[in-house]
Image (tube, coloured by chain):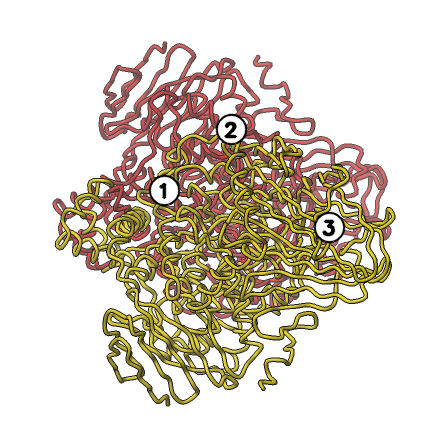
Chain colours: A red, B yellow
Amino acid sequence: MNTKMEQRVELSDEIWSETCWEIGESRFDPDQAVTAGSNFMIGNGYMGYRGTFADDRADQYPALVVTDTYDNADGTWKELVTAPNGLFTLLSCRGKDILWRQGGFGEYERRLNMLRGEWSARARWDDPGILVEEERFCSYDDLHLLTSRTRITALGEVELEIATGIDGKVWSLNGNHFSSLSLEEGPDCLEASCVTGEQGYHLVLREDALLRRAGGAAIEPCETASREGALCRVFRVSLEEGQALVLEKRVVLYSSNDLRDTSRITSDAARGPLPTQEEVRQATAGGLSRAVSRSWEELREAHRNIWKDRWDSADILIGGDRVAQTLIRYNLYHNVIAAPAHADHLPLGARGLSCQAYQGAAFWDQEIFNLPMFLFTDPETARRLLVYRYRTLDGARKKARDLGYRGAFYAWVSGDTGEEICPSWFFRDVLTGRRIRNHFNDWQIHVSPDIAYTVWKYVTATGDQEFLELYGAEILFEVARFLASRVHYRPGLERYEIIRVLGPDEYHENVDNNYFTNFQAQFVCRYAVEVYDSLSTDHPRVFDDVARRIGLERGERDAWDDIARRIYIPEADHETGLIEQFQGFFELEDTRPEVIRERLLDPGEYWGWPNGIAVETQVSKQADVTQLFMLHPKACSREVIRANWEYYEPRTQHGSSLSYAVYAICAAWIGHDQEAYRYFLRSCTVDLLNTGKAVSGGTFIGGIHTAACGVAWQIVVSGFAGMYLTRSGFGFDPHLPSGWETLAFTLKRWGDSLEVTLHQRAMTVRAREDNSREITLEVGSSEVALPPGQQVAVPLR
Amino acid sequence: MNTKMEQRVELSDEIWSETCWEIGESRFDPDQAVTAGSNFMIGNGYMGYRGTFADDRADQYPALVVTDTYDNADGTWKELVTAPNGLFTLLSCRGKDILWRQGGFGEYERRLNMLRGEWSARARWDDPGILVEEERFCSYDDLHLLTSRTRITALGEVELEIATGIDGKVWSLNGNHFSSLSLEEGPDCLEASCVTGEQGYHLVLREDALLRRAGGAAIEPCETASREGALCRVFRVSLEEGQALVLEKRVVLYSSNDLRDTSRITSDAARGPLPTQEEVRQATAGGLSRAVSRSWEELREAHRNIWKDRWDSADILIGGDRVAQTLIRYNLYHNVIAAPAHADHLPLGARGLSCQAYQGAAFWDQEIFNLPMFLFTDPETARRLLVYRYRTLDGARKKARDLGYRGAFYAWVSGDTGEEICPSWFFRDVLTGRRIRNHFNDWQIHVSPDIAYTVWKYVTATGDQEFLELYGAEILFEVARFLASRVHYRPGLERYEIIRVLGPDEYHENVDNNYFTNFQAQFVCRYAVEVYDSLSTDHPRVFDDVARRIGLERGERDAWDDIARRIYIPEADHETGLIEQFQGFFELEDTRPEVIRERLLDPGEYWGWPNGIAVETQVSKQADVTQLFMLHPKACSREVIRANWEYYEPRTQHGSSLSYAVYAICAAWIGHDQEAYRYFLRSCTVDLLNTGKAVSGGTFIGGIHTAACGVAWQIVVSGFAGMYLTRSGFGFDPHLPSGWETLAFTLKRWGDSLEVTLHQRAMTVRAREDNSREITLEVGSSEVALPPGQQVAVPLR
């Protein structure tokens, strides 16, 4: 008998796991409404539904966030819309509401089952004596379906009123998005019909509620009535002790964009006209009919099957560390539900669909933090994310043009069209109340080479030549073209430089020759030349198509080549091994985060541009030089990586959740085992242990940090297992945390799969039977070719 | 009888002039101590002595400012030293001090005689009844001599104590400069002997005081005693009504640098070792002996003769406007006394020798604002100022090197060595108390091309080929070399750009392609090629010398040529005629100074970098595009100048005293006569009417704005008379203010002189008899050649 599996593992004071496949809490803390709402959320890449309670109102931050609904309500923030809450249900007894949010339960539990993508909660009230058990999921089988089932058991004689319907009073971050919102009773359902104010999108949500006695007949509602902005059907039921009710709710929603042609999107106009409200309503009605025609168990089974498939390729097994096992699944889960697995014209948002924060939009995080997990476990999703970048090329071209450049300057904040939706003005100096111009949108240029670099990575890992020809080459050429128009040549020094940028470390704006940015630019120019040469030689017709489409000339290729050869790349110092983050960095005040923190006049001060406490110091917000190492593990020797890790680490504040993972990965490589594990835990618990304020200076900053979730996969696979891409397969340089007995995961390459299992002193790799080719493994100085169906064991150290 | 000459002209509520050769005040206002001390100051280019009273102590801002004594007392500011006050004299009667600063006179007058460079004051006290009349000057005949004569007349029976000597408690802006200061009684004199703390300079000042009864014998002091930090000889005298005393004081001072070799200075080290204290003392002693050996009248006569010569060439006669007549002389006077006419290794300071503010150092003001008056009236002084730039080339080379450039990057604040003495940190944000990094020293690069441009102007106006060969070419080549290392080439656009600068308008830092800066850079590169070609062809030996000295290569000349041809110069818009101050300026918020002033949270806020209220608006601190027109009157059509004047003028705050003159000059050209005259008055009264605070946020910002003084000449001659340089002489495009009957001045060219007289409808120009060649005049479309001794009259309009 495996006793371990029955023992609860405590992830925090609040959160535990029993099976390492779920998280749960047994104590209700109303102060954690925001954090728990995010942690326990469910979703399916089309919609996200926060893990709040059925009776929660706007002040408890419930939200049904719907993708592809970008709309600007306040003139500043273009963001996704929160739909009316179709799972709203309010219990009362003799005129007194029985509210989850007021606590006072006899027993209580909330769970998120990551294996199945299901939320559940149970609570026992003593007065009146009832036990309520709810389960819900956003269906992966029908992405437009959100459904719940609630069982209410009487623990004594009780008269209950159950009001269930749609709450139209939604929580919305930056203003009301709806120019009209109507809640009406429809045929066998309730309906919310909304029109967004800026874009005029229609959103229609229908709710079907079925209440029946457990093992008995359906109960009819006695009226349809409003409950403070929620339109509900009201049921009144008397129960004897032991009797139970079951409420099934099926919620279906469609928005205008769901009905538009997505096959040829490169700009909003290319999607064709908006459908009418009636068309959206019909789509919703059709969806609800389908959902109602199937039993709740059937719906759930179809949903669970898809999750099973996902985990088959995505799961990471960690033996000997149940905390790590649970954490890694928690993080992978959130990366999966954030990804638009159904569409290739949508971004993976920095907060996924956990809320509206960060505008439901993609940052460089998408390619660098979220995507690699998919690339090696679910490459179709990785491809979709990159096709999204292709479909948004016009937005990137527009941004480049607007700022006086050529090619594709990808948006810092990229929504549906790829046009820049990062406002220039949103910061306020808390000390003076003065607004501050941020330069994320015009100076943080590395997003473009980061995307082109990921094209390289995707094509290398998958061998997807079709992608390269249809999409990748054009992205790549346009980014190289942008870089060629963005670099400056220094005649005296006979080199190219990149001036006035913001690297990954956002505390230092307006800097020159940022190591990360210049290196990425060089890499991309070199790759663009390579693709130009190979395509034009080997696939001249394909090449001509691309070249004609974007007006590419031979001279541009030569310019990229010249840039790749002569761009200035700061070198590691011969003695110290240190690489300067940007020109002049080492001349800044050399101090530490804890020292300059003392200089804060207000805890809410922004540390960066233009005059924050970090600007004139060597204190960085997040990894920058080390960030480059993460992308190019072989760019520098281990000694150089170690020197820079040791230099920059104590100077890094980790003001971004993107930072921990980078330090974890590099620490693993250089044998800083304890630090690696510590940073792994910090990165994996950014959300789970988040006890910080969710609302700061009036801005909601809660929600799931999807990049930290996605990169968890990389910490384990690229960091601890030391996996890196080689031309003919993979290399490994493992450094397992000392407490890990085993580590096992699947890797996909060229459509084939490898099953990798690591122990402290050996690793085995098995090639699946149905693999199509030999894959070469590099471990230390040895190289092994692994044909289909074969397994190899390699001793370590 | 000329009644006009006897009528007082009121320049302000306080200040009048009787003869248009002096300013005077008849009301004593203790609140104006700082301003009046500057306005009434005397000086001779070696020392400046503020127009305070003989008994003023440090809190009244008296100062004897001595050139060539740059020393850093507080670790931030390197500045000139204020010497002990050798003119200190304190009257008392029966133990009660009779103090000027306490006022309470029966009658009172203070005058500055600009014609003679003499200060005088008189006051009548009623109790005790005495009349005190003092006159003083800094001798132009012996630059180390400061002298005064005071006549004290008894208006009744009175017993006076007269304590006269040296006050060692000096007012010093940024800390005490003296590591030691001793006041001692010497042979027939008192002596102050000081050593500066940073540089270890010696400064020895001796004072001789001779008191005698009017028309009678000398009086011996009864003791030598201290008066609160002043070492004085004390005389006690009884006077009958009508009896008078005369006190003559001769003060001589030398500092270490006065004795060092200045013939080969290019850096401090090249000046050789510091003299000993004894050597400085001997120099002072010798100077005092010479001064004592001559009568006070002789000393004064020698001084006056030099002033007479200066005015012979410098004076501007304005008929019909006595206010303008007085103002112009007041301004020319202050420009003259600020200029180191005795040395070519010293700068003309932005506040001259009126105080220590602005560090006694040269800014771009020296070449662009101060120098042109000398160039056309006293070219030897202009030459000295440019030789100073030659002698400080090493400092400029060091700055370029330190910042990663080549050639000569002249200091924004240039003292004796030419090294940058502008601190990086001195601003504080008044709202947060946080320090602000200013970028005057590293981004305001136009100072280098401004100096090289002035080399062109000087050589063109004087034909001084020797200067070009010895000094000018090297300055020019080194500046062109700097520019070549500072420009960036944009491969996509096939043009050079200048990135991240601060133009003349200091509210907009970190801008690209500032019109002024790029235009000046192009001009200089073009001129450098021209000089390179002509020198190497016509004077190969000279050229080889220069080229060898600085390691110049042919390829550099070609690089300058390429830059001159392909640097991006913003063009006037075809429709509006507008030229964009820098890239993106027209996209900034379009508002006015009076509008954004309302946004101030504190009147002391800095409007500029990094987050001042003007930064993100089109509000400029000072002229920028129009500033370029001032330097290149023919660069654009009158229509373009008008369009830009009219656009930028209402958007300019005139936060710099350099701004008014530019708008005055350009207004004259485009026929905005009233505006031209209004800006002329504003520019000429920057100091005279200064009622603003002299101390702001703890920083003393008083003192004479020498640039505004120097540019007064240009407003009249370049603006109203419309004078511009041509290849063969001068052009004129006059627009006299309507109230001016005549305007007459002298112009020097190639060592020859022209006397120019303008009336509203005609002008006459006379070439001096001893001119050596024909000078061509261009007026409108007509051209006249003017041989020596000839006169020509040209009708206007």
Name the chain letter of the residue that bears numbered label 3.
Answer: B
Mark 3 to mark 2 CA distance (whole Å)? 83 Å
Instruction: Give the answer, above or below, for where B40 lies relative to A618.
Output: below
Numbered label attached to residue B400? 1
Q: Are marks 3 and 2 on the same chain?
A: no
Image location of residue A5, percent across then percent down:
58, 19
Numbered label attached to residue A328? 2
Q: Are marks 1 and 2 in contact (CB under 8 Å)?
A: no
Q: Are marks 1 and 2 on the same chain?
A: no
The numbered mark, 1 or 3, whose residue comes first in the sequence reads: 3
Instruction: Give the answer, above or below, for where B588 lies relative to A468.
Output: below
- Within-10-Å neighbours for mark 3: few <14, some 14–19, many 20+: many
Q: Does residue A266 appear in the picture of this structure?
A: no
Q: Quadrant of residue B269?
A: top left
Q: Which quarter of the figure is the C terminus of chain B placed in?
A: bottom left
- Horizontal side of B794 relative to B18 (left or right) equals left
Name the chain letter of the residue that bears numbered label 1.
Answer: B
Q: On the image, numbered disc 3 is attached to which residue?
A: B55
| Amino acid type for the residue under numbered disc 3 | Asp
Image location of residue A223, percent across then percent down:
75, 62
Q: In front here: A132 or A18?
A: A18
SS for callout 2: helix
Q: Nearer the viewer, mark 3 or mark 2?
A: 3
Instruction: Give the answer, above or below, for where A398 lies relative to A475.
Output: below
